[in-house]
Amino acid sequence: MTWEWFTDPGYWAARLVFQRLLAAMYLVAFLAAALQFKPLLGERGLLPVPDFVRRVPFRRAPSLFHWRYSDRLFATVAWSGVVVSSALVLGLSDHLPVWAAMLAWTVPWVLYQSIVNVGQLWYSFGWESLLLETGFLAIFLGPADTAPPVLVLWLLRWVLFRLEFGAGLIKMRGDACWRDLTCLCYHHETQPMPGPLSWYFHHLPRPLHKVEAAASHGTQLVVPFALFAPQPAASAAALLIIATQLWLVASGNFAWLNFLTITLAVSVVDIFPVQAPPLPGSPVWHRGLLIGLTVLVVVLSYRPARNLVSRRQVMNTSFDQLHLVNTYGAFGTVTKVRHEIVIEATDDPRPDEDTVWREYEFKGKPGDPRRRPPQFAPYHLRLDWLMWFAALSTRYAQSWLPGLAEKLLAADPETLKLLRHDPFHGGRPTYVRANLYRYRFTTPRERRETGAWWVREARGPVLPTTRLGADGAVVAVE
């Protein structure tokens, strides 16, 4: 029996680039986890993992931390992920036996699975599941000295198709501004975390915003079908998706979502100017695993595929606890007005109308109107993103915003590391409060005259003036 149909040497270079890029995304994800977990998820974090694993059984959230949790163990898992991902970026798995290469790619998948499944709100974003789904398929791609397996390459296209087509459908079924092509007249200003060029994108002429929206619909609703066409049509479709994602990278900060989409699209391209060396096929047992993997994905794809055609389509949902086959989508609704929560504190012994309140500055989200929006993607600032959701509705922050106020009043060093600027330089304030502000980009004239990127207006309190009580909990001031 011939097994030639299992492999295609023409994708040898694409597989190598895909694997390096995917390993880099793992590296960024583990680094973000290592540097941010303690104040967010640690034993004394805002949403502690020990509390979560006590109330949620292993079968609902498989994780190594059901066995045991400590901040030291979490740090070990995260930094081990950094080390393994770095090794994969350097290609140290390229010439391992097939079984060893599979094991090398299984390690980051298991470690990150364990983090995501206890990450709660901080890990509730679609790019977490996308990294796990893509990472699971990457386990079966094989090392560099074997021919790329066709079945896995097609399964990667299926992920990319669902990612793009699902995002396109959720837009057409969602906000009317997507159908009249006006959403991007608002989105560059109101997106969760604008980037350094977002001000300029926002001020593009209105007709260009309509072109942007139309191009988005074409790339997400039409182009994905060409991924399954013969070459070179599939490569052309992938390159169009890459171009669109680079536009999104330039216009905002969406963690590693755009970068991982580009990574998936790279696996489709067969026009790399690199000649593949003579490549043997993988062992028979590996081919058997590939068939089993394909059957598994087909079976698990039933509910995500049904979701695509449903009028009640949901975004960013996993239908299995291991995030093997998921649904995706973003910004079915686009906010037209930007609000931000500004947290302030004072060290006055008793606040009154003359009290000077000083602001905490976050690393990524808008705060000081004169500060240009920074570039952080593909790195993910988890607290900053949740602050955007909290400004949309305080129900997104009920479980952690009072705790954040408590940490700031206690001048918790780990929490302060999440911020760009602590106005008290490690000292304890006596009172803290949070107010809602309406933010908008300055006009070009305002920008020239003031040097500011934003204009803001106070809208009212979100968290009343609070202090630490005798028991260490926050108490609202009458």
Image (cartoon, helix red, strand yellow):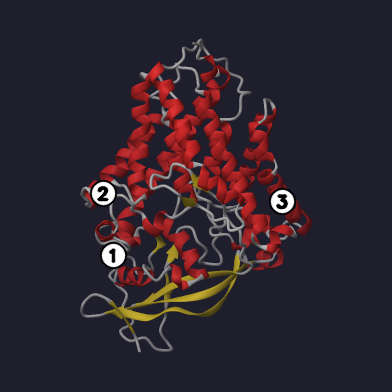
Above or below, 348 relative to 223? below
Q: What residue is rendered at 54% in x and 52% in y?
A: 253
Residue 411 percent location from the top left of the image: 29, 67
**Proximity of marks 3 and 1: CB atoms separated by less than 8 Å:** no
For label 3, count other residues whose C-alpha is less than 10 Å away and answer few (under 14), some (14-19) or many (20+).
Answer: some
- Give left or right: position of 63 versus 234: left
| Residue, far right | 207
Secondary structure of the residue carrying tag 1 is: loop
Residue 234 percent location from the top left of the image: 66, 30
Residue 65 - label: 2
- Give left or right: position of 37 versus 208: left
Q: Earlier in the sequence, mark 2 or mark 1?
A: 2
Amino acid on which the number 1 mark rests in the picture = Asp
Q: What residue is rendered at 66% in x and 45% in y?
A: 220
Residue 212 - label: 3
Residue 230 percent location from the top left of the image: 67, 26
Mark 3 against mark 1, which lies toward the viewer?
3
Secondary structure of the residue carrying tag 3 is: helix
Q: Is residue 7 visible?
A: no
Above or below, 262 relative to 303? above
Amino acid on which the number 2 mark rests in the picture = Phe
Residue under circle 1?
412
In-front residue for pair 462/203: 462
Number of numbered tags placed on the structure image: 3
Q: What residue is rendered at 47% in x and 32% in y?
A: 295
Quadrant holding the C terminus: bottom left
Secondary structure of the residue carrying tag 2 is: helix
Q: Is residue 29 visible?
A: yes
The picture quadrant where one finds residue 222 is top right
Whole-Å distance between the Cαs marked 2 and 3?
Answer: 44 Å
Residue 9 percent location from the top left of the image: 55, 17
Q: Earlier in the sequence, mark 3 or mark 1?
A: 3
